[in-house]
Amino acid sequence: MIKKILLLCIVFILFLCTPGSSNTASISNDNNTFLIGQIQIGKSTIDDVQAFYGATRSKIIYNDSISVKTIEYCFNINGQYVKLIFESSIMGNHSVLTGFHLQSIEKNSFHCKTNSETISTNNGIYVGQKKSIFFKKFPFEFKAKNENYSYEEVYTRQMSDSEFQDMKKQWPNISNHAFWDVLVTIKATFKDNKLTDYHLRKVESY
């Protein structure tokens, strides 16, 4: 009887240790990571941003030969200057947001709006945040190189009914259970143990 119980315990432990037998922490489970207020990466558009933050001129830049449409805002938060950049790559048709960028900057000629509240993501990331607090916001580990940290994750998301219908117009033979391939990258830079640069991108492709 004791041997049988020990055997069952060993089998149970091996099951727990088997890859895929337990839930793995994933950024896909936390929408707040992709939200700044009501603006959501992958959902909101450049027009939505301008309606919320105010009209400003957009521009096209190139990252690794990929065109990206960006709009910038600057805030003076109790003497700390923070630039907030929203971007939409060609994968977002230069409309749907595919990323945002928070940067600590020196005061310059760029017009900065005085703001009493910290500009932060909905999961609590903001410029000037202590490194120890920053990493508590994520259920996974970052790769480190000096004061630069990065994280990358690839996962799939099933298309919504409206997305499927839109895609079917372009791809008549698309599978009835079609999925998006999603790539998320996060880059963070610290100085004196405080966050100075935070860049998140989320790109969906089929």
Image: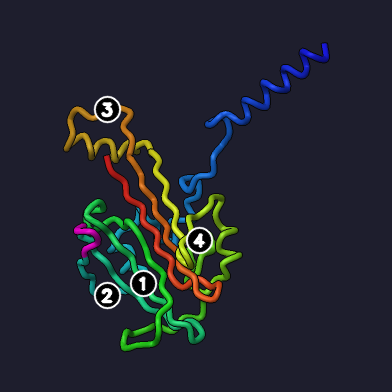
Q: Give the mark, 3 or 4, whose residue is nearer the N terminus.
A: 4
Disc 3 secondary structure class:
loop
Q: Amino acid at mark 2?
A: Thr
State the CA–CA distance, disc 3 to disc 4. Answer: 34 Å
Task: Answer few, some or many: residues within 10 Å of disc 1's Cα (few below 14, many 20 plus, some between 14 and 19).
Answer: few
Q: Amino acid at mark 1?
A: Tyr
- Residue furthest out toward the front: 146
**For mark 1, what is the residue?**
53
Q: Quadrant of the N terminus?
A: top right
Q: Give the mark, 1 or 4, whose residue is nearer the N terminus.
A: 1
Apparent side of residue 173 relative to residue 3 in the rendered image (left or right): left
Q: Which residues are magenta?
A: 62-66
Mark sitting on residue 56? 2
Task: Answer few, some or many: residues within 10 Å of disc 2's Cα (few below 14, many 20 plus, some between 14 and 19).
Answer: few
Residue in the foreground of this view, choosing between 72 and 22? 22
Q: Nearer the viewer, mark 1 or mark 3?
A: 3
Q: Give the mark, 1 or 3, whose residue is nearer the N terminus.
A: 1
Q: Amino acid at mark 4?
A: Asn
Q: Nearer the viewer, mark 3 or mark 2?
A: 3
